[in-house]
Image (tube, rainbow, N blue to C red):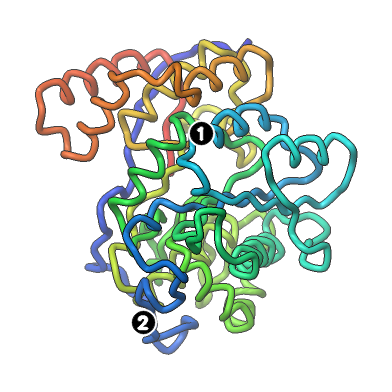
């Protein structure tokens, strides 16, 4: 059981469009300069706003999807025909096949699977780009629409709201991408985001189409666990945390592209060491605290969950339509109206107080 220790504040990061003021980037340096991509440039066969709730879910896993039962219940709450599922798995086995089948998913072309350790090198970026290209090649969802969104998850990610709620929320942000942009101080103020993003599909397809330029510019910059090297300075983090945020910004996509990620996680306070990993949640009590806080702060997915029976049962209760609480709807509506309603403010105060018992801080 994970101990509840002292002092956590749940910080909402970057949900609004990030201003470029004070962010210095070189137009001559970054790839994809000056190219503008409008939402209709990779048009679906069905060009109506009804398609804006069509989502491709892509998974980056090693050899299993231990939260498959949670995802299966989640997909069961999606509007009919409004989603597709594509998996990049490095190793094959009977358990993985069972998970993929239970989710109604398919696996990426074996030729596009990236082998080896993906962490802290360009291989992680390449695997993500391959998934985006795989969605493009797969074509329309069962409802006849090209997926408008591509949501990336790992084997430890899970939804914390029904699919119907998620798709409805996405429909309100056409042409946007849910990417963070935290400015990292240094000689060159680069932006940084969690890799677990939700992209407007045209943005994702444009990135996949320009992967040679992206590899040429970014492929050599990872300097081990220390961070990435950019113009003589080292910026702490993994390459995938920098590539997408900065390339999307320089690409100048139309729309509000920096909406903050929809996937949250808990990162340690200064006096807690996890060697570069977010907190793993294996107890239902910890999971409930985290989920309730995340919802008030606009998160619809969370990581890293351990697939214990109690955590799985709790997660399934959040995504199953029969368990869908109207209070959660009220809380999320508050989040979208910037907390102007009194109830929203009381929810935020309550949530901050509850989480004061934990020694972790939230990070996009």
Q: Position of residue 99 (x, y in %)?
A: 75, 36
Residue 36 tag number: 2
Q: Quadrant of residue 139?
A: bottom right
Real-space Cα distance between discs 2 and 1? 32 Å
Name the foreground residue: 8 vs 139. Answer: 139
Residue at the spot of label 1: 159
Residue at figure coordinates x 35%, y 18% from the top left: 325
Q: Position of residue 81 (x, y in %)?
A: 52, 48
Q: Position of residue 150 (x, y in %)?
A: 51, 56
Asked whether, in this view, residue 65 is left or right of residue 198, the answer is: right
Q: Quadrant of residue 109?
A: bottom right
Residue at figure coordinates x 49%, y 26% from the top left: 319
Q: Position of residue 308 (x, y in %)?
A: 68, 17
SS at circle 2: loop
Name the foreground residue: 17 vs 78. Answer: 78
Q: Is residue 72 above or below residue 276?
A: above
Q: Give the mark nearer the N terminus: 2 vs 1.
A: 2
Q: On the rendered image, what quadrant is the N terminus found in?
A: top right
Asked whether, in this view, residue 76 is left or right of residue 350, the answer is: right
Q: Quadrant of residue 122?
A: bottom right
Q: From this viewpoint, is residue 92 visible? A: yes
Residue 189 tag number: none
Q: From this viewpoint, is residue 267 visible? A: no
SS at circle 1: strand
Is mark 2 in CB contact (under 8 Å) with mark 1?
no
Asked whether, in this view, residue 35 is left or right of residue 140, the answer is: left
Asked whether, in this view, residue 116 is left or right of residue 78, the answer is: right
């Amino acid at each position: 059981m994970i101990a509840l220790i002292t002092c956590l504040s749940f910080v909402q990061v970057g949900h609004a469009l990030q201003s470029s003021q004070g962010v210095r980037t070189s137009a001559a340096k970054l790839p994809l300069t000056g190219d503008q991509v409008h939402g209709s440039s990779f048009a679906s066969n069905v060009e109506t706003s009804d398609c804006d709730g069509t989502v491709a879910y892509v998974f980056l896993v090693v050899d299993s999807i231990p939260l498959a039962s949670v995802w299966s219940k989640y997909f069961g709450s999606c509007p009919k025909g409004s989603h597709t599922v594509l998996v990049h798995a490095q190793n094959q086995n009977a358990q993985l096949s069972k998970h993929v089948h239970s989710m109604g998913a398919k696996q990426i072309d074996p030729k596009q699977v990236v082998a080896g350790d993906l962490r802290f090198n360009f291989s992680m970026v390449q695997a993500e780009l391959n998934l985006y290209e795989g969605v493009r090649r797969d074509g329309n969802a069962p409802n006849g629409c090209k997926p408008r969104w591509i949501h990336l998850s790992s084997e430890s990610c899970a939804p914390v709201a029904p699919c119907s709620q998620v798709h409805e929320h996405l429909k309100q942000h056409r042409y946007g991408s849910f990417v963070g942009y935290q400015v990292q101080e240094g000689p060159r103020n680069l932006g940084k985001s969690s890799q677990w993003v939700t992209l407007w599909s045209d943005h994702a397809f444009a990135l996949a189409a320009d992967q040679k330029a992206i590899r040429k510019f970014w492929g050599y910059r990872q300097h081990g666990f220390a961070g990435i090297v950019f113009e003589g300075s080292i910026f702490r983090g993994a390459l995938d945390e920098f590539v997408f945020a900065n390339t999307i910004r320089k690409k100048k996509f139309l729309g509000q592209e920096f909406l903050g990620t929809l996937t949250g996680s808990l990162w340690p306070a200064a006096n807690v060491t996890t060697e570069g990993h977010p907190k793993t949640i294996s107890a239902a009590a910890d999971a409930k605290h985290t989920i309730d806080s995340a919802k008030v702060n606009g998160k619809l997915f969370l990581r890293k969950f351990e697939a214990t029976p109690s955590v799985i049962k709790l997660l399934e209760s959040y995504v199953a339509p029969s368990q869908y609480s109207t209070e959660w709807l009220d809380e999320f509506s508050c989040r979208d109206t910037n907390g102007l309603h009194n109830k929203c403010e009381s929810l935020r105060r309550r949530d901050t107080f509850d989480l004061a018992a934990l020694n972790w801080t939230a990070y996009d």
